[in-house]
Image (cartoon, rainbow, N blue to C red):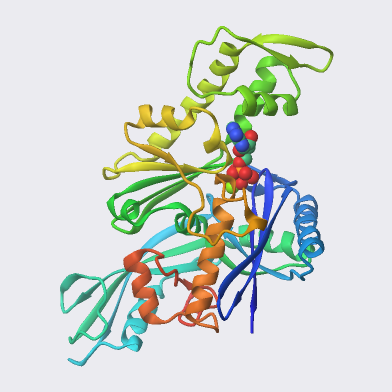
Amino acid sequence: MAHEINCLDIGTTKINLLTGRLTASGPELKGLITVPSKGIRKGVIIDMQEASSSIKDAIKEAEKRYSIRVDSVITAISGSSIQIIESYGATGIGGKKIRDKDVENAINSAGSVYIPLDRELLHIIPVEFSLDGESGIKNPLGMKGFRLEVKVQIITALVNHLENLSGACEQAGLRIKEFIFKPFALQRAILKDEEIEGGVLLVDIGGGTTDISIFKDRRLISTETIPVGGNHITNDLAIGLKIPVQEAERLKIKYGSAVLRNSPDEIEIDSLRNKRTVSLGIVEEIIYARAEELISLIKDSMKGLPGLCGTVITGGSSLLNGLDSLIESLLGMPVRIGYPEGFRASPVLSGMFIPQNSLVFGLWKMATERKRSDKNWRYRIEDLIEWARGLLNTPKTLLKGGSLCLSLKNS
Ligand SMILES: Nc1ncnc2c1ncn2[C@@H]1O[C@H](COP(=O)(O)OP(=O)(O)OP(=O)(O)O)[C@@H](O)[C@H]1O
Ligand SMILES: [Mg+2]
């Protein structure tokens, strides 16, 4: 029997709803609906009614276009509401071979940390095991020993934030099946194995926010959300040139550049009253100032972290002309633009594998791979270990509602 899978990205500028199903022969993408988002500012819901009405628009459009019913989704979460802590757990083995159950016990004991009432557990990720004091063990299954210890990352989110997202979806008639931490989904869609291994800065530059994550040695080692995105550039142009926001957006996309080219050209702009010309050099200066500020914030968030091999930028604003070269020169490492990759192309999705859609395709990858590995949405212990080793090569997080997880809250 086929399982319907719907993934939702509630962004500051757009809502993306990707629909499809998992059949016996594999995942089948049906289509992607994108509608403008309302009621969201800097990645946060500021008007529940408006947010929910734009989610409803996306659902209605998907139901009409693909003759399906959308009643539940997987969605992403990030931002300042997220907290990552490390914890340790242990279990006795009694000299026998380590089985699934032993690893599960060790992980569960690591998860038995105090989680404040205003937070909810999202993922517990095993990072490394030690057996009888021998550290650095990636997969202890089948090994013999007496004491198995595990180091885990525990990811929690503020209950309020989750409830606001759930509330907006519920008002639109949708149930959220699962929240996935955004950097994990993004990396599934756009990063290569060697980047996650060697060290990479992943930057999703959207409309209202920039999410910065650092992966190294196949682990997420740092993450931060900055409330600055492409809309700030548009607003700077609107204010600086005294033109409407729509005209500023058009200018940015058509003529904008993050690199100062000292262009002598004049371009025609449409202000409210009349048409006039403005020097392209001024447009570039306005964009450059904001882009440089954003890059310096990115640089700050990397302070004290290990050396990296490169940067991958994604999100709609990664398409800003020259932004990749500016980041490359200011951060001093190679930069590429990340497009969702590794999806079976179907005519209905042609042209949709673009940076704005990286997150929703990453959610899809995670959902379908996990679903394939276990039809009951349960997580096998080998998958978990593999997951920690290959960081979501097979995404089997211990998620809320999963088999191992997670009545751990305050237990
Ligand atoms: N070709 C382009 N050149 C420059 N900017 C672009 C281009 N295409 C899209 N953008 C900008 O990308 C931004 C939207 O990106 P995206 O769809 O990733 O944001 P979002 O997911 O809605 O927002 P957020 O992730 O911040 O909540 C807008 O600011 C838009 O102006
Ligand atoms: Mg986004």
Residue at (63% x, 59% y) in the render: 160
Can I make out residue 189 in this image? yes
Can I make out residue 126 in this image? no
336 in relation to 184, above or below:
above
Is residue 77 found left or right of 134 in the rendered image? Answer: right
Is residue 132 found left or right of 240 in the rendered image? Answer: left
Estimate the x, y position of residue 258 in percent, counting from the top left: 51, 24
Query: Which image quarter holds the N terminus?
Result: bottom right
Residue 158, quarter of the rendered image? bottom right
Estimate the x, y position of residue 351 in percent, counting from the top left: 62, 48
Front residue of this view, candidates 382 and 221: 382
Front residue of this view, candidates 168 and 351: 351
Estimate the x, y position of residue 120 in percent, counting from the top left: 54, 67
376 in relation to 224, above or below:
below
Estimate the x, y position of residue 24 in percent, counting from the top left: 57, 81
Is residue 392 found left or right of 218 in the rendered image? Answer: right
Q: Residue furthest top?
A: 264
Residue at (43% x, 50% y) in the render: 223
Q: Residue furthest front?
A: 347
Residue at (27% x, 45% y) in the render: 306
Number of disc labels = 0
